Structures are given as structure tokens and as C-alpha cells.
Amino acid sequence: MSDIETNLPSLTPPLKFNAIQPGIFRGSYPRPINYEFLRTLNLKTMISIVEKPISFETDANLNNFIKENDINLIHIECSKGGKGKKRNIPIDYPSIVKVIEIIIDNDNSPCYIFCINGGQITSLVVACIRKISFWSSISIFNEFITYSNAINHNDRLFIEKFQGEINLPTNRVPWIWNGLSKVIIENHPTLKFKENKAQITGI
């Protein structure tokens, strides 16, 4: 092995890492071994969906990484994720709407969304993101199981009943409704989309 090869930085993604859409990534809580990999993504935003905000006191390493790379860290509060068939839902709809409004603003991309283990909580958020793009329930649940190993009744019900009013940014990400007509978007079964605090009249 050459000296060049041995001096290359180790690129280890966080557990359960993947791209949701161009410039939008998901995974588990970043550890120091993941920092070099995350640096290659040129992140503008990180959305932390954990119990307590990240700070120098709670995680000096990650806090320093975020500051050194000029990343905007946004904390979304949640309760502790559960285990098993009867686990509860640790996040509410308003919090998920907030995440969606952040990631569909192209000014915040590239963006990394994470919870502690990249499992239930992040998967619930991603499932609701898929709903704004009109994914079928079967596709959403299959993706959920890929990252959470299982989906229980509470998870399914939460995803199926997801509803809210989403404020659209001026600089929307290009992937949000690629190929869909205005009529289809305005007649979304559970979500309303607003622009400049008024019902959208064109997309």
C-alpha cells in the first residue's frame, strides 16, 4: 500500500445513512468517526431530532464540528424512542411540519436529518416527507421497515393520519413535486400548502 493510500482520511458514514432526495440525507447521531464523511457532503444544515439540544456541554466534539464547518444546527424536540410492538410515537405533527418546511427550502440544502439511532424517529419524519410527494402507503411502509426493522400499529396510524399546513418557501427544492400538476397538489388528501401565508394559486 502506498503512502498516499495510507494517508487518505477514513470515510465512514453514520449508521443507517442514506440520501432521501438530492441534497437531503438521513442517518443516526454523528460520531467522531463520521465527521470526515459528513464533511464531504458540504452540509449547510443539520436537523437534530433528539431529547436535548446539542451544545458544548452535551457533546463538545459534535458542537465543534458544526461550528468549524459553518453548519446551521436546528434542534427538534422529541421524547425518547421506544422499542417493541407497543412503542409510542415520540414526535408530533407540528414538529414534523417544521422539519418539512426546513428541508423544502433550497437555501438549507444540503441537509442531514438524524435521531439517536436513525431508526423510528427519523423514519417517521421521512415517511411524512414521502407523503407530500404522494408516495403510496406500501412504499412508505417498506422504506420504514428497512431502517427500523419493524413497523407497529402506532407507527402506521401516525403516518396514515399525518396532516398539517405547510408554508412553502420562495426558493423551493426542485424535487418536491417534480412532474405533478397544480390540480393534484392542491387536492392533497391530508395536507395544505401555503405560500406567503395565503393559499397557493400557482406552482
Image (cartoon, rainbow, N blue to C red):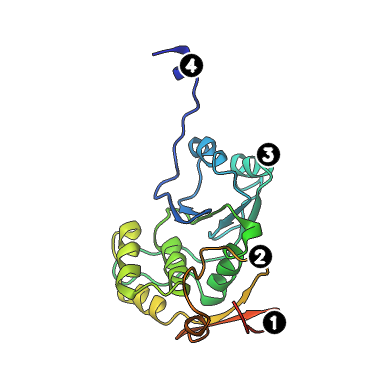
Residues at circles 4 and 1 in contact by the CB criterion of under 8 Å: no
State how far apart marks 1 and 2 are (Cα). Answer: 15 Å
* Of the two numbered discs 1 and 2 in the rendering, the one whose residue sits closer to the viewer: 2
Label 2, label 3: how many angstroms apart (C-alpha)? 26 Å
Q: Nearer the viewer, residue 116 or 66?
A: 66
Q: Earlier in the sequence, mark 4 or mark 1?
A: 4
Q: Earlier in the sequence, mark 2 or mark 4?
A: 4
Residue type, mark 1 in image? Lys
Of labels 3 and 1, the one closer to you: 1
Residue 171 circle label:
2
Residue 95 in sight in this render? yes
Residue 172 in percent (x, y) is at: 61, 66
Residue 158 screen position, x and y as percent: 41, 77
Task: Name the residue carrying label 3.
Answer: 68
Q: Residues within 10 Å of mark 4 (few under 14, many from 20)?
A: few
Q: Residue at x 68, y 43 (%)?
A: 67
